[in-house]
Image (tube, rainbow, N blue to C red):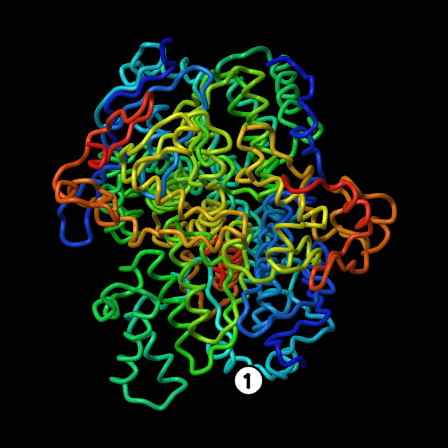
């Protein structure tokens, strides 16, 4: 079809105005800005992300260097603004580096869960039939285990370390992503555009990853945001149990665990990492809930 | 108010305040419905026909909707000034509404007989048994076969056509049905079913003393059922007249274009090209003060862009709103 | 002359689980349908919801797998082709969809939508493809300036033009238009019908035009197939079918169709009563007999054969006997 000649005037007249609409992203961004809780969540997250990125610049001390003379210094009483812990390490610096570790945990755990969840969920929903049945039964089995138990079992098999904890959290989150991806792919693949593109000769891979997946990103991003928060919380839990980060890593859960006996004598050593964890998780949950309200029309009234 | 008139809308303006700006959905609209007549409000998507209907029974969501100025007189009362409670009383009794998709307006967990009986019980003193008998009677009136049995059905057990009949029965259940607003009542139905429903509506209008405001985009449906017609375009009324005036002597360029673009028009029996109206329906956000049809109109000149025209009377009851009424009259050939 | 496409005894059944218990039921969406499409013809397929016209359109393009039967295109059965051969054949058989809102991927730009078939079938270098996209956009009446816009920024009519551009990008021979204009406003519908006519003349296309709107089918088609509950009940050249239809259902359809002439309203029409039955459990015998005013005893027992009642005019009704 090489000709650019125009057909008789009656059919070529639709050069009319476009609907001056904005991109879906701009639309959502506007809605997000109006949601106070989601914005609060976003600000908290941004704060932690910036702290994590600039940790070496922001931290006044080395987080693992011990100052035996200044053990258990109270906050605002010395050069250590937030005090020191039982080994004389600067609390503020440990919290700042802890943010870095928490963000890495979130990225890696969510990354693992996302990668496998999207791939498996997409295949399950797209091909359907026995493939789908087998995958969904496996997911049911995984979900039948108490979540934390599953994580602990995986860590126990892999051996306790921060890296293994991240992997374990990632693996145990996979079933949720499979379910969410599968549900939205099932809904999305009913649309005519999938059939239309198949009629053009598009391959399964092209249909799955280039046509359907981009339209399923909304629910996935909600789950990823919420999953980020829970990954931080679980890693703290695993470290508390001694299955995650090992001393002297400034991991928030580990900081709580190793100082729990000072809860009455030096409250800040236990409380400050607890508050940091709480804030970070709260930030992701607020943003996740806000995103869900905007992106998931079923939640609207 | 004129004795003949059941409803009279004067100069209403309905706006919606959206983030992108003010959408002027209905502008300076006046129309009336006589007792016992079927008025068809016809136009394409976005012409404001449904908004007009929702203005009558106050179903415009506010905000973002704003009804600016004007009045809606129904049986000597201005509906725009009535308190919500009074409006709610009117809805479903004197002003009823049927929609394109009846499933959404029927309660899925109650039998249709119960739902119908409830309408009786709400407005009249009678026992449950009497109400049920009345309900069955009504189902029979709307020509539902074996009405006693069907009264025991849930909405999902009925076909689309049957559900629409139930909705019509609901509208008739009130003691003094006055106006029935039918918003695209047959658009979701198959042609053979559409014919049944249109036939039923025409039949009932004579049996029960009521007027129908029929909202549709389908000129065929208009020709089959309407007494009078109001043609709307982009929130404005552009032509009004009796159904014969509109189809025999369409005088506004838009009405002409609309009728000419119908493939069912007899002059296309030889598969020649259709006379399409160029361009698209305008965006309601970017409308100026001029005639909204100007940019798609063959007759338009500068004056059309500047102001919306006053009415031109073609003959009694037949008016158009067009600056170029004379030009249209001269050039428009006889309907072939 | 050899037909472009021959459809022989095509069946497409779906297994559905019924509400009561686990009993599987068979939905016969397309039930033993045979017809030919000649080159250059516009075959209109008309019928009410549940008649299987849309399933038929998708099955003859092998967008659904068949249950039984053959679809011969250029002498080869579509369903016997391997994946690669089928992908190659997709260049010449294309489809325009009903809903211009769901048939365009909302995350793709116009250039990517129209360019997709060209890229899949390696129609040229990126630069050449870009040029082709602009040519096609011009041809269907969309300013190429808009090629980086997303579908939601266009009106319904413009979107349908994009859908047509995509279907025609590879210069196909045969295009199935499935309710291609029914979601559009009347004035825009006329533009699209004209466009389809122009493109057909220019590119020597053959259409299978599926619609529920009798007026549209009557206007555009050269030959018309009428379907009811999965079966073809009547088929004839356009003029023959419009003027001399014999099947009671075709008569009912023509009678029910609202005319745009209020003067003819008075001619009281015969309206066929009853609902369209579910295709899951169609009535025994002729599927139309419960609604048919002429039904005889035999109609309740046996399905009537599709018989030639005039040259090129077939009808499935016991009244023809």
Asked where in the image residue A283 lies, by quadrant, the reply is bottom right
Q: Residue furthest front?
A: C267
Q: Is residue A36 left or right of residue B291?
A: left
Q: How busy is the neighbourhood of tag 1: few (under 14 within 10 Å), some, or many (20 plus)? A: few
- Is B19 positioned to the left or the right of B115 in the image? right
Viewer-closest of A80 and C197: C197
Tell me the element at label 1: helix
Query: Which x, y percent locates residue B171?
Result: 43, 72
B273 horizontally vs B155: left or right: right
Up/down of A110 relative to C118, above or below: below
In the image, A150 versus C125, the foreground residue is C125
Name the subunit of mark 1.
B
The residue depicted at 56 percent of the width and 18 percent of the height is C201
Answer whether residue A298 is visible to the viewer in this image. yes
Between A27 and A77, the one nearer to me in the picture:
A27
Image x and y of residue B273, in percent: 60, 29
Tell me where residue C200 sits by quadrant: top right
Q: Label 1 belongs to which residue? A: B86
Q: How many marks?
A: 1
* Residue drawn at the location 59% of the way across and 76% of the way down: B6
The vertical placement of B186 against B136, above or below, is above
Residue at 31%, 70% (x, y): give it. Answer: B139
Give residue B206's position: percent from left, percent from top: 45, 70
Q: Quadrant of the N terminus of chain B?
A: bottom right
Q: Is residue C315 above or below residue A218?
A: above
Question: Would residue A7 appear left or right of B310 to someone viewing this image?
Answer: left
Q: Quadrant of the C terminus of chain B?
A: top right
Q: Is residue C113 visible?
A: no
| Viewer-proximal residue among A203 and C297 | C297
- Residue A31 position within the rendered picture, expressed as x and y whole percent measured from the top left: 61, 55
């Amino acid at each position: 079809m090489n000709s650019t000649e125009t057909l008789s005037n009656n059919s070529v007249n639709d050069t009319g105005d476009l609907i001056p609409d904005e991109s879906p992203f701009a639309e959502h961004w506007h809605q997000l800005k109006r949601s106070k809780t989601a914005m609060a969540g976003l600000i908290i997250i941004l704060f932690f992300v910036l702290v994590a990125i600039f940790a070496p610049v922001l931290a006044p001390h080395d987080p693992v260097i011990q100052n035996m003379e200044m053990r258990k210094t109270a906050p605002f009483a010395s050069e250590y603004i937030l005090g020191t812990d039982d080994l004389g390490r600067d609390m503020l610096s440990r919290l700042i580096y802890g943010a870095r570790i928490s963000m890495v945990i979130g990225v890696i755990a969510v990354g693992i869960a996302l990668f496998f969840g999207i791939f498996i969920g997409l295949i399950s929903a797209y091909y359907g039939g026995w493939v789908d049945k087998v995958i969904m039964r496996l997911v049911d089995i995984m979900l039948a285990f108490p979540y934390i138990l599953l994580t602990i079992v995986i860590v126990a098999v892999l051996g306790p370390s921060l890296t293994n904890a991240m992997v374990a959290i990632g693996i145990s989150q996979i079933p949720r992503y499979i379910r969410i991806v599968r549900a939205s792919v099932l809904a999305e693949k009913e649309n005519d555009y999938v059939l239309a593109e198949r009629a053009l000769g598009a391959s399964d891979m092209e249909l799955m990853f280039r046509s359907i997946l981009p339209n399923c990103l909304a629910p996935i991003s909600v789950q990823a945001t919420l999953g980020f928060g829970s990954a931080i919380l679980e890693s703290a839990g695993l470290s508390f149990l001694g299955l995650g980060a090992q001393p002297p890593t400034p991991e928030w859960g580990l900081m709580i665990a190793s100082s729990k006996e000072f809860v009455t004598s030096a409250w800040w050593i236990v409380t400050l990492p607890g508050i940091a964890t709480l804030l970070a998780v709260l930030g992701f949950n607020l943003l996740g809930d806000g995103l869900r309200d905007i992106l998931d029309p079923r939640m609207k009234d | 108010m004129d004795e003949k008139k059941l409803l009279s809308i004067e100069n209403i303006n309905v706006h919606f305040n959206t983030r992108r700006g003010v959408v002027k959905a209905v502008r300076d609209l006046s129309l009336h419905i006589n007792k016992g007549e079927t008025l068809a409000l016809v136009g394409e998507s976005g012409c404001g026909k449904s908004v007009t209907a929702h203005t009558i029974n106050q179903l415009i969501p506010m905000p973002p909707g704003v009804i600016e100025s004007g009045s809606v007189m129904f049986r000597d009362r201005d509906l725009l000034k009535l308190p919500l409670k009074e409006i709610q009383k009117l809805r479903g009794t004197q002003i009823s509404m049927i929609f394109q998709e009846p499933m959404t307006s029927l309660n899925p967990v109650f039998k249709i007989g119960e739902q119908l009986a409830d309408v009786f019980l709400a407005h009249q003193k009678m026992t449950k048994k009497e109400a049920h008998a009345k309900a069955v009677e009504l189902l029979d009136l709307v020509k539902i076969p074996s009405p006693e049995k069907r009264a025991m059905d849930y909405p999902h057990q009925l076909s689309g056509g049957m559900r629409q009949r139930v909705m019509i029965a609901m509208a008739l259940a009130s003691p003094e049905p006055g106006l029935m607003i039918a918003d695209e009542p047959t658009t979701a139905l198959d042609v053979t079913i559409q014919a049944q429903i249109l036939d039923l509506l025409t039949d009932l209008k004579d049996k029960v003393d009521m007027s129908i405001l029929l909202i549709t985009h389908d000129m065929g449906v208009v020709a089959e059922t309407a007494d009078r017609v109001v043609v709307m375009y982009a929130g404005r009324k552009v032509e009004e007249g009796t159904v014969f005036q509109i189809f025999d002597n369409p005088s506004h360029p838009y009405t002409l274009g609309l009728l000419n673009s119908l493939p069912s028009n007899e002059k296309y029996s030889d598969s020649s090209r259709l006379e399409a109206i160029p361009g698209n329906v305008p965006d309601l956000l970017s409308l100026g003060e001029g005639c909204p049809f100007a940019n798609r109109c063959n007759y338009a000149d500068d004056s059309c862009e500047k102001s919306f025209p006053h009415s031109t009377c073609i003959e009694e009851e037949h008016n158009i709103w067009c600056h170029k009424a004379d030009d249209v009259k001269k050039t428009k050939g006889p309907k072939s | 002359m050899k037909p472009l496409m021959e459809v022989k005894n095509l069946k497409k059944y779906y297994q559905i689980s019924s509400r009561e218990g686990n009993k599987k039921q068979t939905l016969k969406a397309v039930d033993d349908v045979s017809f030919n499409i000649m080159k250059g013809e516009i075959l209109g397929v008309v019928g009410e919801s549940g008649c299987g016209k849309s399933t038929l359109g998708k099955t003859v393009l092998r967008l659904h797998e068949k249950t039984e039967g053959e679809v011969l295109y250029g002498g080869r059965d579509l369903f016997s082709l391997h994946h690669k051969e089928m992908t190659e054949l997709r260049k010449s058989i294309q489809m325009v969809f009903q809903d211009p809102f769901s048939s365009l991927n909302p995350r793709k730009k116009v250039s990517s939508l129209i360019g997709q078939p060209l890229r899949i079938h390696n129609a040229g270098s990126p630069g050449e493809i870009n040029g082709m996209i602009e040519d096609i956009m011009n041809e269907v009446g969309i300013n190429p300036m808009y090629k980086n816009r997303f579908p939601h920024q266009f009106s319904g009519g413009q979107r349908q033009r994009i859908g047509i551009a995509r279907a025609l990008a590879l210069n196909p021979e045969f295009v199935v238009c499935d309710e291609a204009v029914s979601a559009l406003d009347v004035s825009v519908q006329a533009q699209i019908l004209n466009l389809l006519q122009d493109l057909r003349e220019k590119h020597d296309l053959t259409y299978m035009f599926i619609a529920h709107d009798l007026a549209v089918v009557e206007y555009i088609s050269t030959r018309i197939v009428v379907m009811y509950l999965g079966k073809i009940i009547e088929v004839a050249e356009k003029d023959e079918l419009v003027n001399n239809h014999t099947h009671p259902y075709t008569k009912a359809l023509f009678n029910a169709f609202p005319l745009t002439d209020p003067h003819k309203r008075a001619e009281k029409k015969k309206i066929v009563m009853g609902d369209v039955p579910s295709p899951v459990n169609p009535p025994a015998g002729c599927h139309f007999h419960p609604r048919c005013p002429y039904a005889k005893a035999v109609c309740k027992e046996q399905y009537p054969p599709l018989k030639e009642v005039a040259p090129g005019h077939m009808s499935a009704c016991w009244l023809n006997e």
